[in-house]
Image (cartoon, rainbow, N blue to C red):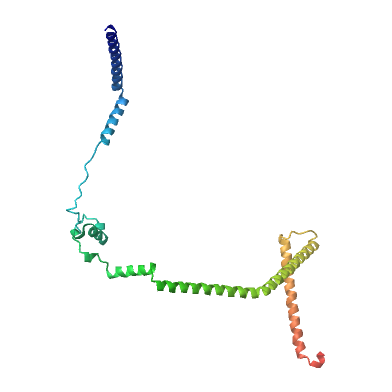
């Protein structure tokens, strides 16, 4: 009995100590503002998460039909598309005449045109394929004829290109010789080497070209006069 009483006293003392520690902890938490605010927010979250709203009742017996004559009704609720949607959802309860939902003659023509464009009949597709193949064949034959014609012209084109290349080389060589001759003449005239870009050299070249043109003109006139006098002279004297 003594041992049991000792154990009971020990357990009660331990329980008192733990109770005191818990009360101190609760007092400290209550005095701490940030922790209390966190606990309040956590409680609000728990309350929000446990909220179970009632489901909305569907008004199937009395559907919403917009007033087409009202100014408050949006324009998109006055269109034929919206009328088709209402009739498809509520049927005759929508109060819409099914005949008004049928497309007009203009709309039917557009629908038929689009259908024929994107889904043509089989015979039309075969004709289109045949026409496209014929066009591709004509283009290929025209290209082959052009290639054959160009290949036939190829030898002459190559010969003309070689001739032009030779003539360009000759012209370049003559131009170099003429330039060297002009530089030599300028050195002899001025007594020193002249820069080809200087005004003196350019004036000398212009003067020489002017003299050459005059000589060519005189030579051409002389040849013409000789031809005229030769045509007038009798054949015996000419022989």
Residue positioned most to the left? 61
x%, y% of residue 219?
75, 78
Is 42 placed left or right of 230 in the picture?
left
| Residue 237 vs residue 190, the one in the foreground | 237
x%, y% of residue 17?
30, 14
Residue positioned most to the front? 1
x%, y% of residue 232?
76, 90
Choose top left, top right, bottom left or bottom right for residue 174: bottom right
x%, y% of residue 167?
72, 70
Residue at x 51% of width, y 72% of height: 136
**Quadrant, the N terminus:** top left
Asked if 95 appears above or below 156 in the picture, the reply is: above
Asked if 222 appears above or below 93 in the picture, the reply is: below
Residue at x 29% of width, y 13% of height: 11
Is 163 placed left or right of 107 in the picture?
right
Residue at x 71% of width, y 70% of height: 162
Please tell me how many numbered marks the rendered image carries: 0
**Quadrant, the C terminus:** bottom right
Choose top left, top right, bottom left or bottom right for residue 154: bottom right
| Residue 97 vs residue 88, the one in the foreground | 88
Asked if 25 appears above or below 64 in the picture, the reply is: above
Residue at x 77% of width, y 88% of height: 230
């Amino acid at each position: 009995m003594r041992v049991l009483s000792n154990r009971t006293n020990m357990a009660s003392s331990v329980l008192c100590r733990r109770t005191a520690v818990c009360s101190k902890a609760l007092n400290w938490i209550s005095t701490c503002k940030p922790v209390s605010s966190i606990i309040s927010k956590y409680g609000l979250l728990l309350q929000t998460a446990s909220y179970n709203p009632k489901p909305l009742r569907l008004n199937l017996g009395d559907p919403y039909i917009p007033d087409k004559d009202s100014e408050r009704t949006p324009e998109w609720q006055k269109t034929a598309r919206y009328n088709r949607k209402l009739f498809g959802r509520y049927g005759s309860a929508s109060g819409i005449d099914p005949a008004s939902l049928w497309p007009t003659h203009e709309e039917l023509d557009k629908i038929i045109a689009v259908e024929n464009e994107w889904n043509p009949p089989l015979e039309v597709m075969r004709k289109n394929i045949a026409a496209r193949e014929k066009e591709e064949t004509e283009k290929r034959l025209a290209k082959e004829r052009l290639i054959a014609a160009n290949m036939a012209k190829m030898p002459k084109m190559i010969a003309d290109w070689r001739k032009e290349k030779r003539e360009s080389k000759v012209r370049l060589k003559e131009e170099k010789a003429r330039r060297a001759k002009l530089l030599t003449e300028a050195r002899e005239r001025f007594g020193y080497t002249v820069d080809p870009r200087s005004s003196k050299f350019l004036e000398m070249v212009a003067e020489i070209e002017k003299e050459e043109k005059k000589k060519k003109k005189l030579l051409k006139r002389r040849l013409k006069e000789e031809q005229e006098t030769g045509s007038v002279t009798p054949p015996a004297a000419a022989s």
